[in-house]
Amino acid sequence: MIDCHVHTRLCRHAAGAPLEYVAAAEAADVSVLAFTDHLPLLDGSETDYAMRWRELPDYVLDVTQLKARAASPEVLLGIEADWTPGKENLLREALSQHPYDVVLGSVHFIDGWAFDDPEWKARYAEWDIDALWMRYFNELAEAARSGLFDVMAHPDLIKKFKFMPSFDVAGLYEAAAEAFADAGVAIEVNTAGLRKPCEELYPSQAFLTACRRHGVRASVGSDAHEPDEVGLGLSFAYDALLAAGYDAVVVFRGRKPFELDIR
Ligand code: ZN
Ligand code: FE
Ligand code: FE
Ligand code: ZN
């Protein structure tokens, strides 16, 4: 199995050193492990959401050294980058500075609000939830179409705290799947949702099936924030992929897609 989304202590809200993640992956029978720590925020603000700009070279060096090991798992250098509308050029420039294997694109902010941070959960009360879902899915499609990312991470993160819309979301899934297909980005099946209030994978089965129908490739990740979480829930992710009709997952090496059979 592959785990192409893990964090380390560098991003300040996760624990564990890269080598501990590699050991955990080995124990969990993970054959491909992509480190995807959070890229520092583009506005330079120093939060607990990401590493600092001055720490990024060390992160790259640490993971690059682990990539050189001959043993399993295969290690990949990735990064998780926030979609920040209007800052596409800055982000493109930042991403060009290191030889990433894979770039995950994440919508974590809407108008600067970290809607997935439990600390800011009360802010849902200020929103019409239907409008919020439409807004989120617009941002997601725009992010996909920016061409900056290889994989759209936890693609329906907006469901995290279970503030669900009143309308049928099939149309939103359809539009997102279309955007992913047009842009050639993959969707991520992320098991962290199983450990959150929504208690299900990101994305929902219907969203994943829509992506499959549109020929969108799929990646898989635990979004581990501690070594013990590496590989967690992956069997559920693979079951969901098979049920959606997938027969392969994708890994990116040097930002080029390679498909691995899952049957
Ligand atoms: Zn994180
Ligand atoms: Fe994320
Ligand atoms: Fe993450
Ligand atoms: Zn994440």
Image (cartoon, rainbow, N blue to C red):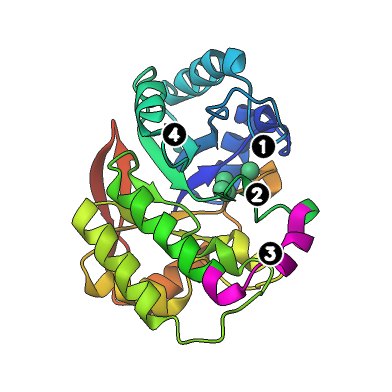
Q: Nearer the viewer, residue 138 or 24?
A: 138
Do the residues bearing badges 4 and 2 touch, measured as CB atoms within 8 Å?
A: no
Residue type pointed to by label 3: Arg
- Relative to 106, is 218 on the left or the right? left
Q: Earlier in the sequence, mark 1 or mark 3?
A: 1
Seen in the picture, residue 168 relative to 247 is either above or below; the reply is: below
Position in image of residue 46 (x %, y %): 69, 25
Can you identify the residue that label 1 sits on?
Answer: 49
Q: Please, what secondary structure does the residue beneath circle 1 have?
A: loop
Position in image of residue 174 (x %, y %): 31, 74
Position in image of residue 5 (x %, y %): 51, 45
Q: Please, what secondary structure does the residue beneath circle 3 have?
A: helix
Do the residues bearing badges 4 and 1 touch, measured as CB atoms within 8 Å?
A: no
For residue 78, which numbered disc appears in the image? Answer: 4
Q: Residue 248's quadrant in the figure? A: bottom left
Q: In this view of the protein, can residue 68 be seen by the observer?
A: yes
Query: What crowding class fits label 4: few (fewer than 14 Cα within 10 Å), some (14-19), or many (20 or more)?
Result: many
Q: CA distance from mark 4 to mark 2?
A: 22 Å
Q: Earlier in the sequence, mark 2 or mark 1?
A: 1
> Looking at mark 1, is its residue's CB closer than 8 Å to ligand 1?
yes
Could you tell me which residue is drawn at 57 percent across and 48 percent down? Answer: 111
For residue 114, which numbered disc appears in the image? Answer: 2
Q: CA distance from mark 2 to mark 1?
A: 9 Å
- Relative to 133, is 220 on the left or the right? left
Position in image of residue 239 (x %, y %): 44, 74
- Residue range highlighted in magenta: 120-131
For residue 195, which numbered disc appears in the image? Answer: 3
Residue type pointed to by label 1: Tyr
Could you tell me which residue is drawn at 46 percent across and 52 percent down? Answer: 153
Could you tell me which residue is drawn at 61 percent across and 64 percent down? Answer: 193
Residue type pointed to by label 4: Gly
Seen in the picture, residue 32 relative to 110 is either above or below; the reply is: above
